[in-house]
Amino acid sequence: MSTQEQDDPIGAAARRLFNDIFDDASARRLAPGPTDPSLVDGCWAQCVEGGFVHALLAEAQGGIGLTLPEFFSTALAAGACASPLPVVHTALFLRLLADTGAADTVLPEGPIAYAERLTANDGVMSAVNVPWAQVSRWALAQTAHGVWLLPVDQHASDMHTLVCQGTEPGAWQAAGGRALSVDADTLRSVAAAGYSVLLAGVLERMLAMTVQYAGERQQFGKPIGRFQAIQQQISAMAERVIAARMAAQMGFTDDIYAGRQDSLAVAKAITSEVVPMATSIAHAVHGAIGVTEEYALQRYSGVAHAWRGAAGGEVFWRRWIGQRVLADSALPRDFLRTHLAGVRVVDAA
Amino acid sequence: MQTLELTTLPESVEAMRGRLRAFLEREVSATPAATRARSWMRFDAAFSRKLAAGGWLGLTLPKSYGGQELGPYARFLVSEELLCAGAPVSAHWIADRQSGPLILRFGTDAQRAFYLPRISRGEAFFCIGMSEPNSGSDLASIRTRAVQNEQGWTLNGSKIWTTYAHKAHYMIALVRTDGDASSRHEGLSQFIIDLSLPGVTVRPIQDASGDAHFTEVFFDNAQLGADALIGERGQGWAQVNAELAFERSGPERIYSSMVLVEAWIDYLRGEPDLHADAAELVGELMAWLATLRAMSLAIAGSLAQGGNPVVEASLVKDLGTELEQDIALRIAADLARHPDRPVPAALLETVAYLLQVYPTFSLRGGTREILRGIIARGLGLR
């Protein structure tokens, strides 16, 4: 066992399981594209069995009571496999449901997707551009009637659109949905914190692939990674990928459940911002092979773009931070330390 | 390359902030923003001695040499406060950041006993002798040469772009002692040069803003003592790289434009109708500052644990200087967004100063291209 595994057995177990069940072949069958219910159920059962889906719940609720920082390496590992199922988000949402529900709340089973806002269209509720729309059993979303957990109509949903039956609370209740006493900002923040870490993970994976490819691909008689023009680009990518990981770590704190969202805003603003440059350089280095169906890079860059926009992209979260800073009276240097840093600070100044 | 892990300043270190902040309020806050924006390029020996008297110099040096023995976290906090306040720290900055730690690590007992207490008291100011007229990024091509003789060493050659050699007492210079230019990294050594010696001439170079912090330094048969050699003869390259890791890792690589950020946000807070347009840029810059601060702090953490984060320091410096430059360029654009709105003169002067000097941010301490080369090596590409 390596030191890393000894220091972080949960993260190491997550890396092993996700690498195993979300390998290239199964990931390609899981998403995007036509789904295979038995494959989804089988993979999901292994995530549950491994303890990852319920990791953030207290032991009394069948979990292992991890804090978000303790869950960080697991979430990063999911991102590094382009997480074809919403393992991280389901774990985050189950904790939210457990925290806000009554003591005897029965927690839902199966994958939960975040849909931002469901609107009534042609007798159903729907939302577009929802990651995991086709593989989720539940949708957690704002509606005209507050925040609801609704069963997903998997037959009516496709890879772009998530559909739930019924257009008003009575029908939702009858179908097994439930209204939640969660404010929409907190819900979005929890979702965004998950996307930030997933992004950090998938960006790290794309960097590793790019470095490896540059070392193997030969042109002009030597690996392309020996050319300074390539080195300078990959270094610039590496800087931003490492920054994205740091930002994601800053935002992945239990404070998001308590409505303190400043460092999460930094996390999503930075991780989303890094996506265009990192994906562009990764693809430029790989050349045409990178966009082929058989090669995994396009799958990673595809989810990176989807996660960049989900739960607010960089422009949304920059404005959010900017408005907070402008409405405050603290010196910006202190606002950085005490609000944006993502670690509790004893303010002695 | 090691991972940068989120870290936090120990409470004992955080507790230093209040007294230092109060001191800086008294000493610096009345200075105009455009002057404070000069930050670590502003030289004030009296101010440095007041810092020494307050116990804010020699932070990483042992108590036996008059230091505070507090380590990298304390240096991070003190640097952060000084830079954000725009305090005139240039006099002692080099000695405190790299010359002191270099002498502690490679010096003889006699060298340590002589220099370190003077550094801790703010009485010995240092400059860095690396670049030469024909040796910039290609540092190993330097030609300044020290030849051993009976009294010690004779020094001939010149250094350029040396910050404040005309005001510092000593230079730690990288020079050739053995071999020739084709020997490259072999045969280089470091010397502590007393700048008051005969044969040493310093000529200031005026910059675009009218300031003169750069200098050119000429050595014409300058006779150095035998004890001017620091560290091992022929090990200059390795020593200078250890020194550059100190130089590249600090918060001065993210806060050079912080005085402007604060002046700009202060102005915007009084103009609510500008918020809708400016909020996005405020948020973007603050998000990057927060992230880079965390990365810089992670490097202080690595140093505190005895690590040698050379590659990591390079990547933080490259990202950090890009942000410092971006701040000047993009705030300038924001202030020009509404030509019909008058902008306070002090804010415009601060931007104007930074627009004159920002190109140097990604030159000093290693250019962008050199740093990315170091990162590429860290990634295994070269």
Image (tube, helix red, strand yellow):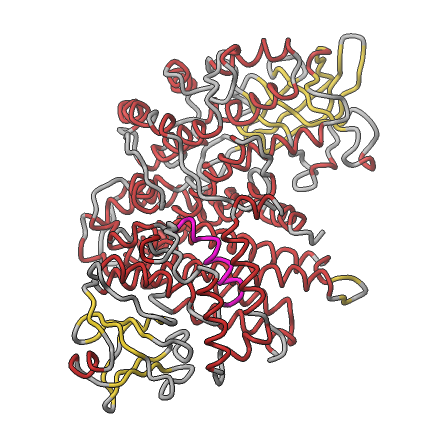
Q: Say which of B202 and B127 sits in front.
A: B127
| Residue B377, magenta (yes or no) | no
Q: Residue at x 51, y 55 (%)?
A: A240
Above or below, A202 against B248 in this view is: below
- Horizontal and vertical percent position of residue A193: 37, 58
On the rendered structure, is B155 left or right of A50? Answer: right
Left or right: A52 in relation to B312: left
**Which of the two residues, B124 or A331, is positioned nearer the viewer here?**
A331
Residue A5 rendering spot, x and y as whole percentages? 57, 48
Is B323 on the left or on the right of A113, as rendered? Answer: right
Q: Residue at x 31, y 69 (%)?
A: A108
The residue drawn where x is 54% and y is 28% is B204
From the top left corner, tell me how far across and down residue B284 is, in percent.
36, 55
x then y, percent, for residue B153? 75, 15
- Residue B155 in which image quadrant: top right
Magenta region's main secondary structure? Answer: helix
The furthest residue to the bottom: A122
Vertical placement of residue A74 versus B351, above or below:
below
State yes or no: residue A75 in magenta.
Answer: yes
Q: Is residue A34 visible?
A: yes
How many numbered discs sit on the rendered protein?
0
Magenta segment? A68-82
> In the image shown, does A256 or A268 lie closer to the viewer?
A256
Can residue B328 be seen here?
no
